[in-house]
């Protein structure tokens, strides 16, 4: 807990500092895919109960950074991570740390919807089951229902909970994946373009949801939509070619960016 | 949960509280168990393999060497007519040569036994050697000839347990009359030896019956088998049979050679042991790499029996099998999985193919007999018919494995190809098939492995047969490795047991070679997406 | 086809192959192809007809049956019967076990499905050898033998079981049934396997051809039957009661059409092959008495067909 | 001669391919995009049309020609042949052919020499005719196809039709095999059922064909209907297969999982083919292993704890058989497990599942159909195995579920009945066919059930 | 050509008619997935050299309709299509039609990026190869390069053309798929949310590309972004629950929709 306070102190000098806690912190994060370096010395704080948006052109390393936060990169053989990333002050790359617990605490929604080839119900129930979050069938039913409701999918699928999740439309699938992530009650939710496959209404619903979730959870979201970043996030980080170009309060970023590249990107003059 | 004061975050988390920690511990335990079970399963399978292989290898090793005896053969012009070799009495030449080594051996039975030391295949080999010019006629030549199976086994130590040699302090006196010998020893060590050998004591006389180890006294250029031993003052006396009266003098020292396995418990008499030992003592025998086994066809004589005919037969049969089963199996799988409409008919076909896999292989033999032999008039006992039958048997395996592999290719790949205007055939052959190749090759490996080891269906089409000539083509009579193994395993001669194991090793080598190609291919196709 | 084809009994197979190999070594003919199909299967193929697609010889561990002969005739096949020797059937066990002397009646009592106890036909109650006779070892009856589909089993039943069969049972089920309660183990056709199983289990006995006892004399001992030991000489002289004749049948129609047939017959019936000191004796074939050899040879060389 | 024609046709194949391709380019005005089909497809079409039929003709010709030639010779020498019996007639043809074209003539004589001359001349003519016909066919095919080449010509369709026809033919082989098997079993089975009522066969609990033995000693007698009850055989088969699967399924599946998800690439690339060797070891070896190592081991163990274990037991045979079929399960399952997309594994890992949870709950269900296929194949192999059972479990048809007793299986009985020494039309031999047919039906039903189950649980990913 | 003129005549009575050609026309298109009907009597014209946008909430049948236009639905076993769809007046569901040719003329970019597990180069080169669009290696190289350039991907991947396409980031993969579709020079390009995985710059590039392509090609695009529809399309069709709610010129649709549902959807008041 000491570390947290230190972090607070450290961040207190920043102009926009209020009373916040750093939930996750990346220091000098470098990532390599084999020979190729994909991230260069990224330093970024994720504040608790805030939404942090990662923006930047395609291929700049947003997903890569996001995947570092719950060590999903471990699954890629050739991927190596250097630098420190902490969750509540603990180094998550510490060998003593438990990846499974970490991932339960730091949930993830992927860019491509990847429902399990199981029923909709089973898709959601899977997480709570493995983490032992429910003691009874009815409790589990409850979790499934609230998760689906939070993801704005419940009404569409309530009659077909036991049909395969893969039979849903693209957008429905993605919302299913969000519901699945919510179902395990993580502390931090990482979302890799969660709305890229959604229509405006579903998107609005998810954005609303994100805003709701913020009260209890910490959220990091990768998005291509400036509007979305502006709508949902409190802080925004701009990546470019593997570098963190700029980071700051969202409103400031969008109105008064410091970096030329950010400005160009936001105004669409980039390239 | 809901009213988090920021600083407390984490400590009360659902995922870090004590219950969760305990759960996590259990889950990790499960994880470790699971992993160890996996590793254990692999290790267990590996262990089985090692056990099986090590048994085979230890049994097989002796078969890869072979003992030869070098004899001076009279190949002068009177004996050998190079123009007309078939008129030459090669057996006579060989027999004269071996008998020439032991001129003292008399009596029809004994001479027959002596001749039996050399393989009955030796005359044929000699003739072939003359034909090929390996041995030139014209004079007396030293030629190495294979020993008979029992002599060979004896030299490999597989017939009789050797008890070693006990040197005697002083040479005994031997008085021999008509093959019987009276011996006087100057010390009593021989009495001890007789006792250890299991002699039956009666009135102070130690009788070495047929149940006792053999004691062979070597002294004075003679070899005497001791029958009775008796202590006498200052020494001992004994009676015995003279087995060889003109033994080559190896050392001046007198000694007793002990053969621990009693004579009644082996198929190799003391006399034969003495002869072979004598040949060895003269440096006439040598152990060589067993080329006969590796490079010649079948034979009823263990020492002349080779595996090459079966190897070629298996190779030809497998070629036919592969050439039929692989393309047809893959094509059928492609059709059923990618092209055929999914209706009741194809469902029936699918079940049917699964069912074919459970049809006992001998039934395929019946089918092959009816269709290929009787109807299409394929020649009996030929790799062609065998290959066809085994191909039919292997087809279901390949089809099932291929279908599973094709099914595992994600539909998005097909859509991608179709979406840019590839035809279905192009989609399948350019994209789906390469991705399914690893699974298809696995099916092929397993199917071919099964086909390679199969005997039952071949019985029906005449491939379970004794065929000496190495097959020259797809229609000449042939047998295959498992049949050869099966037949050798069923012959009474003990020497065939090692041959059996060695043949199994060869079969496994064949299998490994066959698989290696497929495995290399499979590795090249493997990718995860 | 310029190669002789031979089918038939697995029992005769080791001998015929030896002869075939010799014929091939002579260099004038290709080595005949010898298949091991079993006597019945061989007869079926042999009697199937004349012409290249049918075999020239068949091996048989029993004489041809009337039905088979008729079938042959119907298909225009005239078999030439050659009795080539004897095969002793032995009951033996590991050298580690006790050597026994049995009568056929005792064997019957040990192995028959039904036996007569106190005048009544009952299912075989004997579990130990000593149940049959005090003098026999007090070990469980466990006999490994060939399955009912085998010619050896057939001969064993005929030569031992039927001979020792009490009348009461003959009326009941015809004497041919061997018990199925586990005391008799049907062990398949691989006699080497039986040999090895006996080695591992000193209490068990096995039934198989003499050649396996002969070649494994270091490990096995044969049980005397009716006081006679199963030795080469005893079987050859006919003293040992459990032996059967082995045959080959030649197809008369093929002589003169398939090269080498006559030479093959000559080779088989030569003293060097089937004589007491011939190479077939080395392989375990027990020779016929000299007179029989002469008459069989004369018949064979003269190509005297059956029923003509 | 024919060889040259074949070589010529093969050359023509390649030539036609190039000609067709460039022709297509020409008619397409130098741009392949103007064509319906690719130039290479036009080329392939032309090549197939030109060389295909001609090669087929030659193939058929080479199969038919020996008998045609022989029949010509036969008519020429009809008078002479009439004096000979069938084998001699065949020898006549064989020897004259050998004289004509080389080979060993067993019994040469002058008539045969004369016939050899006829053979030579007929052969020469036949070759000429074949060559001319083939070349004519090739030319016709070539020009016909060549004229067809035009921008709108659907060469791809034609070539793909050939491919499809080949694919369909290949599937038909599988069907024909089934038909053939049923046909080769059904007639003998019917004859058997005339002697033994089908219900006694199906529901009888006593299998003891020894009494129906009509071997050396006896003549064929009345068949005892009560000794052909197939139930013990099917129970035995079930028992041994079950034991085998109890060994092979977990070991194989766990091996597959380990190899695909835990083992390093190197370990996997070595271990997998090594395990596959298990499938290739001849069954005789397993038989010896089961009979001489495993069975006595169980026997001793049984003695140790006071259990009565038969020296031939279902247990020994089943376990060893299980070892043999491990690779069927492991290798095939490994492939399908490996084919489950990484995104599913990621999805599960992202929720905080451990690797084993991911495998058990996500990967295995997704791979289920393939795994079931593998298992079915393994079961099939177990059902079809004979040697191990004969050597280690004996041939006694006990009706028992006790794995420590001797049992026998359907396949074993089929084999022993078929290859043993009895008359071919005896009830016993016929019983083998009936057993085969029964087994076919039973496994068919089992397969249908298995397929239903798979369909129900089948989960399509991606 | 007769039919086309007829079509022109027929369409001429519409209020916004100018001189245009109907490239594709769907009449009374009904689609069933097994028992479930996913489209109900949809009548829609796709005008040549224009961009038609399909909008509507998730699961309303946009993708389904799109897939009818090049018969991609044929690959789904349970899918049945009723009604007529024509391309240049020819019924594309006519048995005489060559599906392959149809798909070469009507290309498609999917919602989820699905590169072949081959190199980037091979991914692009595959189409031109099977359609014989190049006579030489250099020509093929040219096609690959221009396609990648048009899709705005060339600079990012030019050094790794022979590395696997599956190793790209999500957005890169999607652009790869667009490049792959362009490479075969289709007449109509169907795009199922082609930009959902793209960042604004890449999106802008693709939109620019769409605008460029419009000169020579006809484009149908499914999108969730109203802005995008407004920016790139000339005509917009609004789907809802399997029905075509409204169809018309884009500017009219967005400023003055006729249907209440359209209005609600556009203004985000839907659901
Ligand atoms: N393969 C299929 N099998 C069964 N139902 C399907 C299938 N594909 C789509 N559907 C159903 O058809 C309806 C229309 O789906 P479609 O994919 O066309 O929606 P969409 O408008 O593209 O949605 P999104 O914007 O989410 O992609 C949905 O209810 C969906 O669940
Ligand atoms: N598994 C991988 N192997 C090799 N390189 C990779 C891998 N995954 C990503 N990269 C590379 O790393 C860089 C960053 O990729 P990343 O997926 O983080 O981009 P992104 O910012 O998420 O882009 P997008 O918005 O398109 O998803 C890219 O150049 C990409 O090609
Ligand atoms: Mg990304
Ligand atoms: Mg869609
Ligand atoms: O093979 P047999 O007929 O002698 O048992």
Image (cartoon, coloured by chain):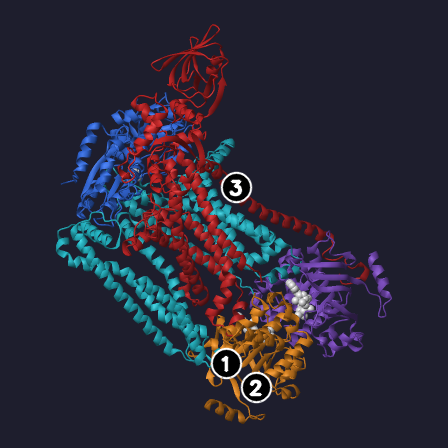
Chain colours: A purple, B red, C blue, D cyan, E orange
Which disc, if any, is residue E49? 2
Q: Which of B30 and D133 lies nearest the eye of the viewer?
A: D133
Check the picture and name the quadrant holding the C terminus of chain E: bottom right
Could you tell me residue B322's position as x and y percent?
41, 55
Label 1, secondary structure: give it.
strand
Residue of label 3: B50
Which residue is farthest top?
B233
Nearer the camera: disc 3 or disc 1: 3
Nearer the camera: disc 1 or disc 2: 2
Residue of label 1: E29
Q: Chain of mark 1?
A: E
Q: Is residue D439 left or right of residue E23?
A: left
How far, Cα to Cα, is label 1 from label 2? 23 Å
Q: Are marks 3 and 1 on the same chain?
A: no
Q: Which of B203 and C159 lies nearest the eye of the viewer?
A: B203
Number of numbered discs visible in the structure rendering: 3
Q: Can residue D232 be seen at all in this image of the molecule? A: no
Q: Chain of mark 3?
A: B
Q: Can residue A97 be seen at all in this image of the molecule? A: yes
Could you tell me residue D258's position as x and y percent?
58, 51
Against B525, residue D234 (above or below) is above
Residue ID at (53%, 79%):
E186
């Amino acid at each position: 807990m000491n570390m947290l306070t230190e972090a607070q102190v450290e961040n207190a000098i920043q102009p926009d500092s209020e009373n916040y806690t750093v939930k996750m912190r990346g220091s000098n994060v470098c990532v390599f895919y084999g020979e190729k370096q994909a991230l260069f010395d990224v330093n970024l704080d994720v504040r608790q109960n805030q939404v942090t948006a990662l923006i930047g052109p395609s291929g700049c390393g947003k997903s890569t950074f996001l995947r570092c936060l719950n060590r999903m990169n471990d699954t890629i053989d050739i991927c190596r991570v250097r630098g420190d990333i902490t969750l509540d002050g603990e180094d998550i790359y510490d060998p003593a740390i438990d990846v499974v617990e970490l991932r339960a605490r730091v949930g993830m929604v992927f860019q491509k919807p990847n429902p399990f080839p199981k029923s909709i119900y089973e898709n959601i129930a899977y997480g709570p089951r493995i983490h032992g979050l429910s003691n009874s069938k009815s409790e589990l039913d409850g979790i499934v229902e609230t998760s689906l409701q939070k993801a704005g999918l419940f009404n569409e699928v309530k009659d077909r909970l036991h049909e395969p999740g893969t039979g849903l439309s693209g957008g429905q699938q993605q919302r299913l994946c969000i519901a699945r992530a919510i179902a395990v009650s993580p502390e931090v939710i990482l979302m890799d373009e969660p709305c890229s496959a959604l229509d405006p209404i579903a998107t609005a619903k998810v954005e609303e949801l994100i805003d709701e979730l913020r009260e209890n959870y910490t959220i990091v979201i990768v998005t291509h939509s400036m509007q979305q970043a502006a709508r949902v996030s409190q802080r925004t980080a701009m990546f470019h070619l593997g570098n963190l170009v700029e980071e700051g309060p969202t409103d400031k970023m969008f109105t008064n960016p410091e970096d030329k590249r950010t400005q160009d990107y936001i105004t669409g003059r980039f390239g | 949960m809901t009213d988090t004061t920021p600083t407390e975050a984490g400590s009360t988390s659902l995922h870090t509280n004590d219950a969760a920690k305990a759960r996590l511990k259990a889950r990790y335990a499960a994880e470790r168990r699971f992993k160890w079970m996996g590793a254990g399963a692999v290790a267990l399978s590996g262990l089985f393999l090692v056990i099986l292989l090590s048994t085979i290898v230890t049994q097989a090793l002796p078969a890869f060497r072979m003992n030869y005896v070098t004899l001076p053969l009279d190949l002068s012009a009177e004996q050998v007519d190079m123009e007309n070799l078939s008129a030459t009495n090669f057996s006579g030449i060989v027999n004269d040569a071996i008998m020439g080594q032991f001129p003292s051996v008399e009596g029809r039975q004994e001479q027959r036994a002596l001749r039996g030391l050399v393989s009955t295949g030796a005359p044929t080999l000699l003739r072939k050697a003359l034909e090929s010019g390996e041995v030139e006629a014209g004079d007396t030549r030293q030629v190495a000839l294979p020993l008979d199976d029992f002599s060979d086994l004896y030299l490999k130590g597989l017939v009789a347990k050797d008890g070693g040699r006990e040197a005697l302090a002083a040479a005994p006196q031997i008085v021999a009359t008509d093959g019987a010998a009276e011996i006087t020893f100057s010390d009593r060590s021989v009495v001890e030896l007789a006792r250890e050998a299991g002699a039956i004591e009666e009135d102070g006389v130690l009788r070495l019956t047929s149940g006792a180890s053999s004691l062979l006294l070597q002294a004075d250029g003679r070899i005497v088998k001791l029958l009775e031993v008796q202590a006498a003052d200052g020494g001992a006396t004994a009676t015995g049979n003279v087995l060889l009266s003109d033994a080559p003098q190896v050392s001046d020292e007198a000694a007793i050679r002990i053969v621990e396995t009693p004579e009644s418990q082996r198929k190799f008499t003391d006399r034969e042991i003495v002869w072979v030992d004598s040949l060895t003592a003269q440096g006439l025998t040598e152990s060589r790499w067993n080329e006969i086994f590796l490079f010649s066809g079948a034979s009823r004589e263990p020492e002349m029996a080779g595996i090459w005919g079966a190897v070629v037969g298996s190779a030809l049969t497998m070629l036919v099998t592969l050439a039929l089963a692989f393309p047809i199996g893959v094509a059928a799988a492609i059709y059923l999985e990618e092209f055929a409409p999914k209706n009741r008919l194809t469902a029936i076909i699918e079940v049917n193919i699964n069912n074919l896999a459970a049809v006992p292989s001998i039934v395929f033999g019946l089918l092959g007999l009816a269709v290929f032999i009787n109807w299409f008039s394929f020649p009996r006992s030929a790799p062609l018919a065998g290959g066809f039958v085994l191909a039919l048997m292997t087809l279901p395996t390949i089809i099932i494995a291929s279908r599973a592999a094709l099914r595992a290719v994600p539909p998005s790949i097909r859509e991608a190809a179709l979406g840019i205007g590839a035809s279905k055939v192009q989609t399948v052959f350019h994209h789906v098939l390469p991705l399914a190749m690893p699974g298809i090759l696995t099916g092929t490996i397993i199917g071919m492995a099964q086909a390679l080891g199969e005997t039952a269906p071949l019985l029906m089409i005449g491939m379970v047969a004794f065929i000496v000539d190495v097959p020259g083509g797809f229609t000449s009579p042939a047998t295959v490795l498992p049949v050869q193994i099966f037949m050798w395993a069923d012959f009474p001669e003990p020497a065939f047991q090692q041959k059996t194991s060695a043949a199994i090793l060869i079969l496994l080598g064949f299998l490994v070679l066959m698989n290696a190609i497929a495995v290399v291919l499979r590795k090249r196709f493997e990718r995860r997406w | 086809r310029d190669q002789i084809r031979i089918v038939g009994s697995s029992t005769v197979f080791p001998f015929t192959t030896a002869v075939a190999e010799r014929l091939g070594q002579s260099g004038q003919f290709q080595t005949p192809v010898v298949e091991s199909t079993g006597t019945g299967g061989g007869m079926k193929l042999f009697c199937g007809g004349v012409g290249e697609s049918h075999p020239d010889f068949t091996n048989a561990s029993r004489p041809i049956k009337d039905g088979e002969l008729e079938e042959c005739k119907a298909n225009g096949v005239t078999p030439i019967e050659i009795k080539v020797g004897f095969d002793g059937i032995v009951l033996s066990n590991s050298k580690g076990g006790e050597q026994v002397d049995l009568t056929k009646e005792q064997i019957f009592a040990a192995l028959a499905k039904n036996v007569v106890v106190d005048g009544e036909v009952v299912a075989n109650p004997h579990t130990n050898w000593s149940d049959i006779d005090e003098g026999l070892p007090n070990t469980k009856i466990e006999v490994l033998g060939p399955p009912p589909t085998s010619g050896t089993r057939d001969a064993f039943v005929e030569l031992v079981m039927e001979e020792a069969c009490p009348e009461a049972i003959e009326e009941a089920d015809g004497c041919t049934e061997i018990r199925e309660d586990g005391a008799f183990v049907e062990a398949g056709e691989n006699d080497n396997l039986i040999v090895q199983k006996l080695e591992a289990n000193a209490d068990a006995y096995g039934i198989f051809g003499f050649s396996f006892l002969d070649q494994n004399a270091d490990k096995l001992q044969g049980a005397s039957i009716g006081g006679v030991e199963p030795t080469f000489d005893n079987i050859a002289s006919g003293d040992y009661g459990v032996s059967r004749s082995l045959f080959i049948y030649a197809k008369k129609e093929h002589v003169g059409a398939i090269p080498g047939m006559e030479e093959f017959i000559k080779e088989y019936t030569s003293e060097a092959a089937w004589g007491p000191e011939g190479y077939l004796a080395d392989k375990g074939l027990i020779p016929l008495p000299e007179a029989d050899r002469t008459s069989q040879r004369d018949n064979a060389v003269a190509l005297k067909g059956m029923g003509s | 001669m024919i060889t040259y024609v074949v070589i010529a046709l093969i050359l023509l194949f390649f030539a036609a391919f190039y000609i067709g391709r460039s022709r297509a380019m020409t008619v397409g005005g130098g741009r392949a995009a103007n064509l319906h089909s690719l130039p290479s497809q036009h080329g392939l079409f032309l090549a197939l049309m030109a060389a295909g039929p001609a090669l087929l003709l030659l193939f058929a010709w080479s199969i038919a020609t020996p008998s045609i030639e022989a029949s010509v010779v036969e008519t020429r020498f009809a008078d002479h042949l009439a004096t000979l019996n069938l084998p001699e007639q065949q020898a006549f043809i064989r020897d004259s052919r050998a004289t004509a074209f080389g080979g060993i003539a067993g019994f040469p004589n002058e008539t045969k020499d004369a016939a050899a001359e006829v053979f030579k001349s007929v052969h020469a003519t036949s070759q000429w005719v074949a060559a001319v016909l083939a070349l004519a066919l090739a030319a016709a095919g070539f020009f016909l196809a060549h004229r067809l080449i035009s921008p709108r010509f659907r060469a791809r369709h034609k070539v793909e039709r050939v491919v499809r026809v080949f694919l369909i033919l290949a599937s038909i082989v599988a069907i024909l095999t089934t038909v053939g098997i049923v046909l080769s079993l059904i007639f003998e089975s019917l004859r058997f059922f005339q002697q033994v009522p089908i219900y006694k066969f199906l529901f009888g609990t006593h299998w003891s064909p020894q009494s129906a033995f009509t071997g050396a000693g006896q003549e064929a007698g009345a068949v005892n209907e009560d000794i052909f009850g197939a139930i013990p055989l099917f129970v035995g088969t079930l028992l041994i297969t079950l034991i085998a699967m109890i060994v092979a399924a977990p070991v194989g599946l766990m091996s597959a999982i380990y190899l695909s998800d835990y083992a390093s690439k190197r370990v996997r690339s070595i271990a997998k083919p090594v395990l596959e060797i298990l499938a290739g070891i001849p069954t005789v070896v397993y038989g010896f292993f089961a009979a001489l190592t495993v069975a006595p081991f169980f026997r001793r163990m049984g003695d140790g704890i006071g259990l009565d274990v038969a020296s031939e037991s279902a247990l020994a045979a089943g376990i060893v058989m299980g070892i043999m079929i491990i690779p069927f399960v492991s290798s095939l399952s490994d492939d399908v497990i490996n084919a489950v997309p990484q995104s599913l594994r990621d999805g599960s890992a992202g929720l905080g599942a451990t690797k084993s949870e991911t495998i058990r709950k996500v990967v295995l269900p997704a791979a289920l159909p393939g795994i079931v296929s593998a298992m079915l194949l393994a079961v099939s192999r177990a059902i079809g195995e004979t040697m191990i059972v004969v050597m280690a479990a004996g041939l006694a048809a006990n009706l028992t579920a006790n794995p420590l007793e001797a049992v026998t299986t359907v396949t074993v009985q089929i084999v022993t009945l078929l290859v043993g020494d009895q008359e071919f039309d005896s009830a016993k031999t016929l019983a083998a066919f009936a057993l085969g047919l029964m087994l076919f039906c039973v496994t068919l039903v089992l397969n249908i059930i298995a397929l239903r189950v798979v369909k129900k649980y089948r989960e399509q990913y991606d």
